C-alpha cells in the first residue's frame, strides 16, 4: 500500500476489481515489451560503438596526415600560393541524407558524393602548384569521406542513446510506480470484498440461528 497516493479513493466493487486486473495485465505486457526494446536497443548501441571505434581511429589518422601534408605544401609553395589555390578549388562536399530505421528508431543516413579528383579537376592552376599541394588535396578528400562516415555513426548512436534513456524511464515508471500501485489497489479491493463476504455469512448464519430459536419456541 506504500505505492498508493495519499487520499486516493478506491471504489471497492467487483466491477472495479475486474477493471484493475485488466489494467494490470496490460501494464505487465507493456513492461515486457519495453524491457525487450531496451535490451535490443542497448545491444545495437554497443554494436555501433564497436563499429565506430576503428572509423574514429582512421579519421584521426587521416586528419593528422592531411594537415601534415598541408603544412609541407605551405612550406614548399608558400602560404600565399596555397591560399590562392584554395580560392580556386571547386567544392567537393556534396552530401545526401535520407531517413532509415535502426531497430524501429528513425535515424538519418548520410551518403557522400565526394569524388577522388585529379589535380586538373580541382580547379587550381597546375603550373602554379606542385605535387605537395596535390597530395594534400587528395588527403583532405579522403579525410572528408571518413568524417561523413563517423558523423553518421555518431548521430545514430546519439539517437539510440536518447531512445534507450526514454525507454528506461518508461520501464522504471511501470516497474516501480504503476504496477505496484495497481497490485495494491487490487489487494485492497479483494480484502474489502472478502470482509463483506465474511460479514454476509455471519449475518446469514445469525438469521438462521434466530429463526431456529424462534421455531423451537413455538
Image (cartoon, rainbow, N blue to C red):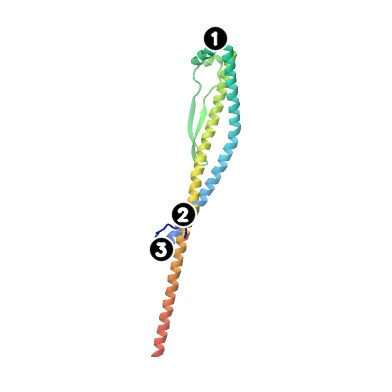
Query: Where does the image place residue 147, in percent across and percent down from the top left?
Result: 54, 28
Query: Where does the image place residue 35, in percent across and percent down from the top left?
Result: 53, 49
Residue that carries the numbered disc 1 in the rendered image: 128
Q: CA distance from mark 3 to mark 1?
A: 89 Å
Which secondary structure lies at badge 1? helix
**Res. 213 visible in picture:** yes
The first of marks 2 and 3 along the sequence is 3
Task: Report the disc number at residue 58.
Answer: none
Give the residue displayed 60% in from the left and 22% down from the top.
Answer: 65
Give the residue displayed 60% in from the left and 28% down from the top.
Answer: 58
Residue that carries the numbered disc 2 in the rendered image: 178
Q: Residues within 10 Å of mark 1 (few under 14, many from 20)?
A: few
Q: CA distance from mark 2 to mark 3?
A: 20 Å
> Is residue 42 or residue 100 the one in the foreground?
42
Residue that carries the numbered disc 3 in the rendered image: 15
Whether 215 is drawn above or below 37: the answer is: below
Q: CA distance from mark 2 to mark 1?
A: 74 Å
The first of marks 3 and 1 along the sequence is 3
Whether 211 is drawn above or below 143: the answer is: below
Which secondary structure lies at badge 2? helix
Whether 87 is drawn above or below 97: the answer is: above
Q: Residues within 10 Å of mark 2 (few under 14, many from 20)?
A: some
Query: Where does the image place residue 162, in percent across and percent down from the top left?
Result: 50, 40
Decide: marks 3, 1 in contact (CB < 8 A)? Answer: no
Indicate the quadrant containing the C terminus: top left, top right, bottom left or bottom right.
bottom left
Front disc: 2 or 3: 2
Which secondary structure lies at badge 3? helix
In the image, farthest residue toward the top = 127
Amino acid at each position: 500500500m506504500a505505492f498508493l497516493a495519499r487520499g486516493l479513493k478506491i471504489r471497492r466493487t467487483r466491477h472495479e476489481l475486474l477493471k484493475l486486473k485488466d489494467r494490470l495485465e496490460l501494464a505487465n505486457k507493456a513492461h515486457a515489451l519495453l524491457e525487450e526494446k531496451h535490451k535490443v536497443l542497448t545491444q545495437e548501441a554497443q554494436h555501433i560503438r564497436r563499429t565506430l571505434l576503428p572509423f574514429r581511429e582512421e579519421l584521426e589518422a587521416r586528419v593528422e596526415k592531411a594537415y601534415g601534408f598541408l603544412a609541407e605544401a605551405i612550406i614548399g609553395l608558400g602560404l600565399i600560393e596555397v591560399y590562392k589555390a584554395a580560392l580556386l578549388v571547386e567544392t567537393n562536399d556534396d552530401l545526401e541524407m535520407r531517413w532509415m530505421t535502426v531497430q524501429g528508431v528513425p535515424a538519418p543516413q548520410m551518403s557522400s558524393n565526394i569524388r577522388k579528383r585529379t589535380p586538373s579537376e580541382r580547379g587550381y592552376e597546375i603550373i602554379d602548384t606542385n605535387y605537395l599541394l596535390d597530395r594534400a588535396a587528395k588527403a583532405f578528400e579522403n579525410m572528408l569521406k571518413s568524417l561523413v562516415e563517423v558523423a553518421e555513426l555518431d548521430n545514430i548512436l546519439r539517437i539510440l542513446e536518447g531512445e534507450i534513456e526514454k525507454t528506461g524511464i518508461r520501464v522504471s515508471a511501470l516497474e516501480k510506480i504503476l504496477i505496484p500501485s495497481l497490485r495494491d489497489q487490487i489487494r485492497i479491493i479483494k480484502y474489502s470484498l472478502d470482509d463483506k463476504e465474511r460479514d454476509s455469512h455471519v449475518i446469514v448464519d445469525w438469521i438462521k440461528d434466530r429463526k431456529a430459536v424462534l421455531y423451537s419456541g413455538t
